């Protein structure tokens, strides 16, 4: 059931090997331990078990139907029917396999999108004091817009401030937050990364958390785990436990 599509959940191959008895004893014990801790994985196993059972039952039914049809033909007809029936059965089995694989893909290709939706919450923002100092006033005004979910307005105002303060980690972090809230992951990720490489930003742990979520949504689990491990947020540790070993 495996193929070269990089977007399919990499656990599928391991699940298939588990269900077909191809895992070693130690691998099976480790896999069953993961099943006890990961309900999403457990659901996948049960669904794939049904898929494999359906394929097996469909193949057996086709063989029985072919056998009964062949009993009512002459020897020469039997040969012809057998050849046609074999090709038909093969084509039908392949079509069934394709349909089930397609169903499987669309059932689980978005598993990380669903995880993302379950774990992502926009940064709540900072307290605002609306001081009289020009830059602070403009920042706080944008923060008010941000906290009211007017992310476009906040982003525009903060971007204007970034033009004169391109290395300001607070502006980099909250413009990235606004971009992520607007689903602009492509531009959000580099700004989070700029925060991470800064020397003493208080937003490093948060930036790592949100970067991990972005890469999880892209199904790049290696980078997602890397950034979750860098984050000091408790939910990053919990999500790493949910994801299990790579």
Image (cartoon, grey):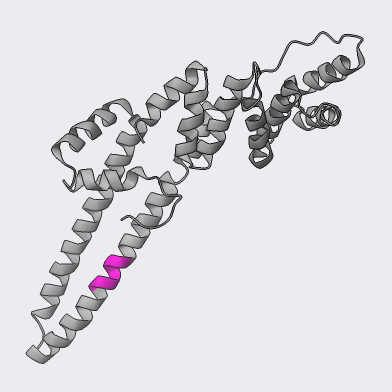
By secondary structure, the bulk of the magenta-drawn segment is best described as helix
The vertical placement of 159 against 76, above or below, is: above
Residue found at x 52% / y 17%: 232
Q: Please provide percent x and percent y for residue 121.
A: 59, 24
Q: Please provide percent x and percent y for residue 163.
A: 85, 32
Residue found at x 69% / y 25%: 173
The vertical placement of 18 against 169, above or below, is: below
Q: Tell whether 33 sits left or right of 148.
A: left
Assign the N terminus to one quadrant of the image. Answer: bottom left
Residue found at x 58% / y 28%: 210
The vertical placement of 64 against 76, above or below, is: above
Q: Nearer the viewer, residue 68 or 131?
A: 131
The residue most toward the front is 199
Assign the C terminus to one quadrant of the image. Answer: top left
Q: Nearer the viewer, residue 173 or 14?
A: 173
Q: Tell whether 120 sits left or right of 71.
A: right
Q: Is residue 229 magenta?
A: no
- Total of numbered circles in the picture? 0
Residue found at x 34% / y 30%: 39
The residue most toward the bottom is 76
Q: Please provide percent x and percent y for residue 150.
A: 77, 27
- Quadrant in the picture for residue 157: top right
The magenta segment:
89-94
- Quadrant in the picture for residue 207: top right
């Amino acid at each position: 059931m495996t193929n070269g599509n990089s977007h399919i959940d990499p656990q599928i191959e391991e699940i298939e090997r588990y269900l077909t008895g191809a895992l070693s004893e130690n691998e099976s014990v480790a896999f069953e331990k993961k099943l006890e801790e990961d309900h999403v994985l457990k659901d996948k196993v049960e669904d794939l078990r049904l898929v494999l059972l359906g394929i097996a039952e469909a193949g057996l039914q086709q063989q029985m139907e072919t056998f009964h049809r062949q009993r009512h033909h002459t020897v020469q007809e039997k040969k012809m029917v057998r050849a046609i029936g074999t090709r038909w059965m093969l084509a039908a089995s392949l079509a069934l396999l394709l349909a089930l694989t397609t169903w499987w893909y669309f059932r689980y290709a978005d598993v990380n999108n669903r995880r993302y939706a379950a774990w992502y919450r926009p940064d709540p923002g900072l307290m605002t004091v609306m001081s009289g100092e020009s830059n602070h006033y403009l920042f706080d005004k944008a923060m008010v817009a941000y906290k009211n979910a007017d992310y476009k307005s906040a982003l525009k105002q903060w971007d204007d401030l970034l033009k004169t303060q391109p290395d300001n980690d607070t502006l980099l972090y909250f413009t990235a937050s606004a971009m992520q809230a607007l689903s602009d992951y492509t531009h959000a990720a580099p700004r989070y990364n700029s925060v991470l490489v800064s020397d003493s930003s208080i937003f490093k742990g948060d930036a790592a958390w949100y970067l991990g979520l972005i890469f999880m949504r892209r199904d790049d689990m290696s980078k997602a785990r890397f950034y979750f491990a860098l984050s000091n947020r408790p939910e990053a540790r919990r999500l790493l436990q949910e994801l299990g070993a790579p």
